Image: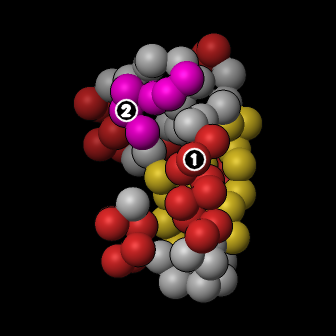
Amino acid sequence: LLVTAALVNPGDKVLVGDPSYPCNRQFLAGYGADVELVPTTAASRFQLDAALVQAHWSEAVRGLMIASPGNPTGTSVPLEELSAI
């Protein structure tokens, strides 16, 4: 929450994997972020991966939130994939 407060400005577009911990998007929205939920699937372990980030990235995006391990799925992002992101 403190990192969100320090880094997010009103109007910043932030990518968040979906499904995800519902409070994460509320934390972002509470500081004025425009949250874009990015649908994930079992193929990506219900996590953002480099391909999903690239497909949803635009000039308006200011950041992304990665939770690893994720809630509610309990999956984590492999180190190689995290590096690629």
How many circles with numbers are drawn on the protein?
2
Q: Which of the 4 image quarters holds residue 51?
A: top right
Q: Is residue 54 visible?
A: no
> Which of the two residues, 22 or 54, is positioned nearer the viewer here?
22
Kindly identify which numbered label has been placed on residue 48.
none
In this rendering, the answer to whether 71 lies above or below 23 is above
Residue name at image x 60 percent, y 70 percent: 30
Compare marks 2 and 1 and give the one earlier in the sequence: 1
* Occupied quadrant, residue 25: bottom right
Marks 2 and 1, how far apart at CA = 15 Å
**Residue at the disc numbered 1:** 23
62 relative to 13 in the view: left or right: left
Q: Residues within 10 Å of mark 2 (few under 14, many from 20)?
A: some
User: Quadrant of the image for the N terminus?
Assistant: bottom left
The colour scheme of the drawn protein is secondary structure
Say what secondary structure mark 2 lies in.
loop
The residue carrying mark 2 is 68
Task: Name the spot of residue 53 as percent of width and height, x first.
Answer: 57, 49
* Spot occupied by residue 80 in the image (x, y as percentages of width and height): 29, 31
Amino acid carrying mark 2 in the image: Ser
Magenta region, residue range: 67-72
Query: What is the chief secondary structure element of the magenta stretch?
Result: loop
